[in-house]
Each structure stands twice: as structure tokens, then as C-alpha cells.
Image: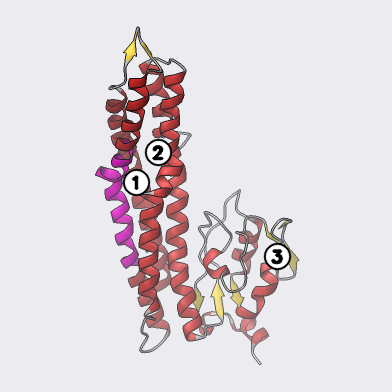
């Protein structure tokens, strides 16, 4: 396994391990939520919009918050956080092989600290509240006012919480994007900081393509090696003289995050949920016929 493959593996392992835990996490959450809604006041088989039920809704919401901040879900988030050290080690090894007496810039420790806080805020606190807990609370509230049966309410919540063979749950689809973007961007930020620190000028666009891959990413994978001086034109959508589709609102290639520029494209790449890599590479890795075009 090459040093670059080790970086890719450390990223993919972190993401895959989190996703692998989700089915058990979903079942754990569904079971606990079922127990919570069983405390609602039910009359003649239907949940009534009584004062007691509306007060219980507040209690249920607080308890749902606690579910996400403990148990199997919290453990999955903690494991994700610990994976950052493995990504650091893989990047250290990569640059140590490229540069003699390599020493990681001290600012990377602050980057790690910030990323750990972002993971907690997104997956355990404000992010999970806005995207998951609020949705579950709304389902319960609507079923209370709608006079649903316990069975109907429980099924509505399970549809929201549990993934099917074809459709991921709200938790699975939302958390996957958060995890993919956070882990990829964390490693890419490490790469960007070291690239600037060492004055590296070459990049390689790495990863496979599928049917719905962004046009820009497909063109970049085909191009493969990129010199720093090419980035301004590439950001405008010109890849080896051919222009890809541009999103009018941002003036950037379709799918790119607004504000992407030559200084941060190594981190943001093709946009949200982009799973390609753009590591810095030594000039020796670049084929001579490509390198010569940029040598003075």
C-alpha cells in the first residue's frame, strides 16, 4: 500500500465505520422513542390533544435529546473523532516520505481541535437538534393534534428513524453527508496547510467516477495532475481547454460550494459530499511531458 493509499484508506475507514454502526443505532433510537411515546394519554385508541399530552411532548423532546447524547449513537461519534488521529498519522507518513526531516506545522493541532468541536456541535448538539430532533418532535406534535392512534404515530416515527433497503432514514442521509464532508475536508485542510508551508506546486486529482459524478470532477480525474498556476482557470470551469457547465448563481462549475477559489479548492474540491481527493504531490511524481510545460 502506497502512502497516498494509506491516507485514502484512513478516510474511507472512518466514514465506513460510522455508517456501519447506523442500523444498530437506528434500532436503539426507535426502541427508546417507542417507550417514550407510550407515556402519552390515549383515549378510545386515539392520542388526544390534552394538556397532559402537550406537557409530555416537552418531556419527550428532552429525552430524545438525551438519546442522541448517549448510548450507541454517542459511541459512534466518539469513534469518528478518534479517527482523526489515524488520518493525521497517514498524512505525516505521506509528507515524511516526500520531504526529509518533515515536521507537521503546529497550527494543525488547532485545526484538529476546531474539527473535534464541529463534529460534536453538528452530530450531538445544535446540528442534530435542528435536523433530526425537531423533525421527530414535529411528527409527535402533528399526531397529537391529528388524533392519531399510537400505532400510526409509532409507524410515522419509525419511517423517519429507520432506513429501508431502498431509502435511508433522515438520520442516515443527513449524518452521512456531515461525516463525509467533515472527514474529507479535515484531511484536505491538513494537505493544504502543509502544501503552503512547503511551497509545493503540484496536485493529483484522485478517485473514481460514477454515473452521477459532477462534470468538473470527471474532467479533473481525467486530467489527473494539476499545477498550481492552472487553478484560477480550473475554478472558472476550464479544464485542459474544455469548459464544463457553470452554475450561474456562483459562476463556478456545477456542484461547487459558493466561495470556492484557487486557495481553498484543495479542501472543497467538487463541493458537498465530494469524495474525490486532491493531495499535493512531489514534482517527481508528475510525468515529465506534463511537467515540462510548467518548467522555466
Return the residue nearer the eye: 166 or 78: 78
Q: Which mark is residue 20?
A: 1
Looking at the image, residue 52 sits to the left or right of residue 145; the answer is left
In contact (CB < 8 Å): disc 2 and disc 1 = no
From mark 2 to mark 1, how far is it between C-alphas?
22 Å
Residue 226 quadrant: bottom right
Front position among marks 3 and 2: 2
Residue 164 visible in the shown view: no
Q: Where is residue 74 in the image (x, y as percent from the top left)?
A: 29, 48
Sequence-first disc among 1 and 3: 1
Residue with the mark numbered 3: 237
Q: Which residue is drawn at 60% across and 49% down?
A: 212
Residue with the most extreme bottom position: 296
The x, y position of residue 185, in whole percent, is: 47, 63
Secondary structure type for disc 1: helix
**Chain part drawn in magenta:** 64-87
User: Any magenta on residue 183?
Assistant: no
Which residue shows up at 42% across the image and 20% down it?
Answer: 144
Depicted 48 relative to depicted 14: above or below: above
Image quarter hosting the N terminus:
bottom left
- Judged left or right of residue 250, residue 166 is left
| Label 2 sits on residue | 133
> Position of 133 compared to 276: left or right?
left
> SS of the residue at dot 2?
helix
Amino acid at each position: 500500500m502506497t502512502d497516498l493509499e494509506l491516507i485514502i484508506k484512513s478516510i474511507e475507514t472512518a466514514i465506513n465505520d460510522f455508517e456501519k454502526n447506523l442500523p444498530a443505532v437506528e434500532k436503539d433510537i426507535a426502541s427508546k422513542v417507542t417507550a417514550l411515546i407510550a407515556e402519552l394519554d390515549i383515549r378510545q385508541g386515539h392520542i388526544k390533544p390534552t394538556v397532559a399530552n402537550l406537557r409530555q411532548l416537552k418531556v419527550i423532546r428532552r429525552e430524545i435529546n438525551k438519546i442522541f447524547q448517549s448510548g450507541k449513537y454517542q459511541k459512534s461519534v466518539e469513534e469518528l473523532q478518534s479517527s482523526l488521529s489515524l488520518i493525521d498519522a497517514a498524512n505525516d507518513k505521506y509528507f515524511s516520505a516526500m520531504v526529509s526531516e518533515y515536521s507537521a506545522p503546529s497550527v494543525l493541532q488547532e485545526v484538529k481541535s476546531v474539527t473535534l468541536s464541529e463534529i460534536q456541535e453538528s452530530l450531538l448538539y445544535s446540528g442534530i437538534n435542528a435536523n433530526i430532533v425537531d423533525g421527530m418532535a414535529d411528527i409527535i406534535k402533528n399526531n397529537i393534534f391529528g388524533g392519531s392512534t399510537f400505532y400510526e404515530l409509532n409507524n410515522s416515527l419509525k419511517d423517519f428513524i429507520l432506513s429501508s433497503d431502498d431509502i435511508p432514514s433522515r438520520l442516515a442521509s443527513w449524518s452521512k453527508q456531515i461525516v463525509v464532508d467533515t472527514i474529507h475536508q479535515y484531511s484536505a485542510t491538513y494537505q493544504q496547510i502543509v502544501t503552503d508551508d512547503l511551497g509545493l506546486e503540484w496536485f493529483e486529482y484522485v478517485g473514481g467516477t460514477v454515473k452521477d459524478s459532477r462534470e468538473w470532477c470527471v474532467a479533473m480525474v481525467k486530467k489527473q495532475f494539476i499545477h498550481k498556476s492552472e487553478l484560477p482557470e480550473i475554478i472558472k470551469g476550464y479544464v485542459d481547454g474544455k469548459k464544463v457547465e457553470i452554475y450561474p448563481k456562483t459562476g463556478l462549475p456545477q456542484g461547487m460550494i459558493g466561495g470556492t477559489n484557487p486557495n481553498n479548492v484543495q479542501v472543497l474540491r467538487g463541493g458537498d459530499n465530494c469524495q474525490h481527493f486532491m493531495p499535493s504531490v512531489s514534482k517527481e511524481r508528475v510525468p515529465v511531458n506534463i511537467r515540462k510545460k510548467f518548467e522555466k
